[in-house]
Image: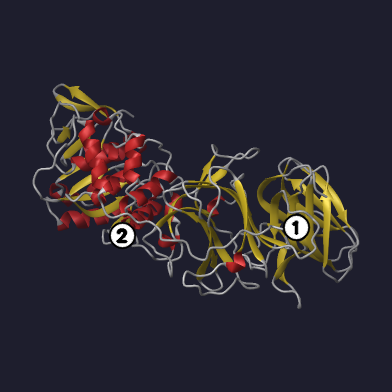
Amino acid sequence: MRLAFTYLSVTVLASLPLAVQGADRTAILLDTDIGNAAGDAFALAYAAAQERIDLVAVTTCCRGAEDRAWIACRFLTAVGKQAVPVAWGRDPQPGDDVNWQIQYRRHPAAVWNRTSKPLPKPAEDLLYDEIVKRKGELCIVALGPLTNIARLLERHPDARPWIRRIVLPAGAWKEVGGRPAQVEPEGNARTDVEAERAVLRSAVPLEIVPLDATAGLVLPPERLEALFAAHNAVTQELRSLFQLAEDPQPSLYEPAAVALALELPTAVGGKLDRQAFLEGFVKTLAGAGPPRLPGPAWNVQRTVDRRGLPARVHVVEDYETDIEKRWWMTGKLEVEETRAGRRRVCRGVLTQDYDDLQGDPSVRYTAVVFNPVPGPPMGPRTRLSFRYKLHGTSALRVQIYSLSNGYHRALALEGLPQDRWEEATVDMTQARRPDGSGGPLSLDERIDDVQIYADPRADLWVDWLLLYDEAPEGEKRPFPKHVLFTGWFDTGAQGREWPGDFEIVKHDPPRTWKAAGSVIAKETGRPWIRVHLRGERPAGAAVKLRLSCRTEGARSLAVELVHSRTGARAARVLSGLEPGEWTEVETAIEGSPPFVDEIHFRAAEGDGAFSVDDVLLWEADPAGP
């Protein structure tokens, strides 16, 4: 794995540029594996903000290169550089998948054509086009594995003499026989060794930023705070990516490579003036534009009582399992600020307002956004109950997207307590569009994203949220302590959104929407329904089950809570059913396994078909009835 090549075309820099001379701009193409560590995001931000740099294109490498290209497109669009072309390296690509920064790519701004798009051409073709366009002028800054650069040199060998130089971070170096030799490869080199060798052998002029020269070059907390306090377009987008990364103190190894591409004065063999470099870096990014902060709250409402057992639960998320992680659109798991008895919460990160029609796309918020899939239809009394913690603000905005109408509605809360866990319930029928239009949520209106926003200068944590239809007047059963699963089958497909053994069937009037219908079990030849819960759900001692069911002839149904991996199960019989009629039944299931991932239904007698709907599994409060 060690690379020990020496070439006259390699220049190893022992120190970094410290000052700007002249006003000429340097044409730079950035080849990056942005999407994991924060360093590449800091480098892209610096390349976009530095006035001396003409950022002509971006290419992305490493596994998930297309997602990484979308991350770059969204960033460049947000900072006013949407004209910069972006292309991704085609598979096979080395390395790991994109980490939490995948959220940045899955934002509606990228998904729904509100940003520039990656070009359809492969990365090496965009590289070649820009080299030909700027013969002898283009500097390539390679921040990831050299896969794309090696393919360029292999497929377009005529480009070699037209490349001004390639700048890359490249491990530890020392003099061997009077020539520079790489004695310890940097991580990207180990990721694609053959590509690294091909580039080092190419005779293209190379300038190396060795790890030795930048070891310990990080932004300390006070400088990081000063940088993000600018709240301009560049620093807010950078902060969003930084919050999703895993680097509490970001290294400036990659931005140093971008700075080197400017050909600023260096003192070979000297020491890096870290103070000057850090000050210049922070000044460049903090001075990249005016702050973007939200205006005053609108449609301010009061919280309401959550009342008793909901008539229906549409959406539940508690962040205790990874079952719905694909739909955590904004926010990142945290284990430090949890409530007693909880393992994980979701911490808000910076994001654009999801409302692209009447919201301000230039403003950022600290937000937690959950996307329930498939989008459920609402009832007449839609409520949202959630647990939260705030620091730095006493206000929140709660917003919801209508799949039926294609727009967002929101309401605001003010005067909320800070620095302690609280619970709030809001009446979502009071939510409106920013101009006051839109009217209330209506019966059977389908919704999508559930969004909670705070000031971008504040911290927000969300522990649990429940979107439901409020209990009717006179309901005596208590609100659930913890909802484990809700299954209503109205939207989405069996197998994808609703895994298990059953078929989705339409209701007969006057009932609307759909239900789960029984199928014949291969093992027994009798009708059954197996509802898979999409993952293991922790079940407490006081588990309750409520559902509506209709049988062709049976007056009772056998139901089991099952942990499929161990075979553990707990069973009850639901009796008192009226064949041919929809009946709501509820039962406590004692002796439930600690974790369950399936619910099985069978006719207790006879072989007639049956259907179930509005399945609700919850943990009751032991102190309650």
Rendered location of residue 388, percent (x, y):
57, 48
Q: Which residue is mark 1?
A: 309
Task: Judge from the rendering whether residue 203 lies leftward or rightward of residue 366; answer left or right.
Answer: left
* Residues marked 1 and 2 touching at CB (< 8 Å): no
Q: Position of residue 213 (x, y in %)?
A: 23, 29
Asked if 192 appears above or below 361 in the picture, the reply is above
Q: Which mark is first along the chain, 2 or 1?
A: 2
Could you say whether the residue bearing mark 1 is in a helix, strand or loop?
loop
> For the residue marked with disc 1, what is the amino acid?
Leu
Q: Quadrant of residue 222?
A: top left
Cα–Cα span, label 1 and label 2? 55 Å
Residue furthest top in the image: 177
- Residue 121 is labelled as 2
Question: Residue 273, position in %: x, y?
Answer: 20, 30
Instruction: Give me the disc on residue 505.
Output: none
Mark 2 residue crowding within 10 angstroms, few (<14) / some (14–19) / many (20+): few
Judge whether 102 appears above or below 172 on screen. below
- The answer to whether residue 154 shows anywhere in this view is no
Q: Which residue is outermost to the front?
A: 415
**SS assignment at label 2:** loop
In the rendered image, residue 299, in percent from the top left (x then y), is placed at 52, 66
Q: 215 above or below 387? A: above
Q: Residue at x 76, y 41 (%)?
A: 593
Q: Amino acid at mark 2?
A: Lys
How packed mark 1 is, by other alpha carbons closer than 10 Å (few <14, some 14-19, many 20 or more), is some
Classify residue 78 as left or right of residue 400.
Answer: left
In the rendered structure, the answer to whether residue 132 lies left or right of residue 364 reads: left
